[in-house]
Image (cartoon, grey):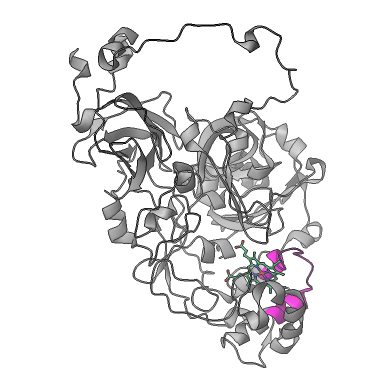
Amino acid sequence: MSTPRLVALLLACGTAHAAGPNLGQPLTHAELAAWNIHVLPDGTNLPKGTGTSAQGASVYAQKCAHCHGEAGKGAVSAALVGAPPIKSIDATKTIANFWPYPTTLFDFIRRSMPWQAPRSLSDDEVYALTAYILAQNKLIGENDVMNAETLPKVKMPNRDGFTPRFPNLMPPRSGRDL
Amino acid sequence: MEKFQPVAGNGLLDRRAFLRGGAALAAAVTGYARAEPLAEAPWSKEPGELVPAYGTPSKFEKAAVRTLSNPKGEPRTSHARTPHQLLQGTATPNGLHFTISHAGNADIDPAQHRLAIHGLVKRALVFTPETLSRYPLVSRFAFVECGGNSAPLFSPEPIQATVQAIHGLASCAEWTGVPLATLLEETGVDAKAKWVIAEGADSPHLSRSVPLEKILDDAMVALYQNSERVMPGQGYPMRLLLPGWEGNMNVKWLRRLELTEQPAMSYYESRTYAPILPSGKAYQFYFIQEVKSFITQPSVGFGMKGPGFYEISGIAYSGNGRITKVMVSADAGKTWAEAALQEPVMSKSFTRFRIPWQWNGGPAVLQSRAWDALGNVQPTRAEIVAQRGVASRVPPPTAFPSQHYNAITSWAIDANGSVRHVYA
């Protein structure tokens, strides 16, 4: 889109309602709460709560191991532990050898797992499972506590392993980008 | 008779040969074979079947179905591929549109579905499918293609599989819906907003980050697909349509759009749809489905019925705009002839190309190569492989050794008329 169009849109929106059908209903933050689950890489929108690897181990054994294998070694579904070197374009991507951000792990477990019953875990359980998987991968210590403060600070080994295909299509980076 | 002289090697004829010449001249090329005497058939001598409420294809067309990668719904992704070799034209029938679902097709009651738009907006708003249907609607054709379509061509050896298996994760439809620019005019856009994170109401709550500029350019909330409501496998009751952009970003079962300063770095953008490069780095945020074409008839599985006349036909498309030219070769790229493009040629949509061919019965290698309105040309396989690498081993036909393969596909025809997939 042309920048003038965006500017026009922003100006139009600054004041009164646009001249469209206006059939949407206003939505408050409270009404949105159950759906408001995006966690951003800088930690924005991480919920309250906390968890450790030890707590995560028991949830994992109960709710994850039958697909992802004992201790995350892999079974019918992918291994969650291990970092085989990336030596070819069809190499196996894992959390430890590929994922750039630790927040993605929390976000994905919370929105998508366990596969047959997503959104059934408490935020504490998601923090605990995140801690367990990161600790099994030796990306955090055994006793490190994961919460909204500590999780975004975890350094992922492949953090700088990416490049956009068409840099000109990427929005300009903002102060909030990591 | 001049126009029936080949215009390129191995019997390719002028694309206009049959436009003005008429059928009589076709006989000059192919010769007539004597017909059987005609008779009244059983279905001409009694009334036919009951007329159904919802029509389905003839029982003689049972082969024209999608192939399924996960027919029992095991806990993994399900793929259903479009049978290009059995279709003509450019609009994929709704039941044959490819589908990829990461945890089955959500079964959504439209009366309870909501679309929320919030984040860096002036007013967060929520819409029902019913209210969205009352907005001024727009219709447009657009192809949707999975970022992993054509991935078998990264194999070190050519995989013997049909065009459906190799290129079946791309389809094209007329989509009708509400332009997102209209809805964002009503919510207002905060000057800090740069991305829109789209989320589905399916069980993985699939989410992808889209630059705001694309959203305001030509994105729509699609409610209809080829005139009927969007199919469950396409996101009923509504999907995000990003014409020309990576299929997975066209979030199905769309329930939420959040305007942000940063991308989410969701699972599917930071891990799954990030193809590894030979350097060990990976592309992240590929966005565009680049210019591509492939021949659908003849292709693997096609029974050539001896030397004579055939029409070579296929599909071309580009996420950058309209297709401007398709060249076809019957001699593995040594010589090329320009194919006819079926009008109307539409931006970011399938374009059907055709060229007449007089097969002399000898070995031939068929290829097609497309150009788009931005001047991009479809690469050769050697070119893409030089940049993007080759898989370390021959993968199963349904695997994804990498993504975003848009180079040339080659079909070899042997003297006995069988068609093979080759690298040429």
Residue A122 located within the stretch drawn in magenta: yes
| Residue range of the region highlighted in magenta in the rendering | A109-129
Q: Is residue B110 above or below residue B357?
A: below
Question: Which residue occupies the extreme front position in the image?
Answer: B37
Q: Is residue B41 above or below residue B332?
A: above
Which residue is drawn at the image coordinates 51% and 50% (left, top)? Answer: B146
Vertically, is A125 above or below B249? below
| Residue A88 drawn at (x, y percent) | 38, 70
Q: Which is more toward the observer, A32 or A86?
A: A86
| Depth order, front residue of B219/B192 | B219
Residue in the image at 68% along x and 70% along y:
A109
Q: Position of residue B294 (x, y in %)?
A: 38, 40
Q: Residue at x 72, y 79 (%)?
A: A60
Which residue shows up at 57% across the image and 39% down it? B97
Front one among B79 and B200 = B79
Query: How many numbered markers are drawn?
Result: 0
Observer-nearest of B182 and B59 = B59
Is-magenta flag for residue B216? Answer: no
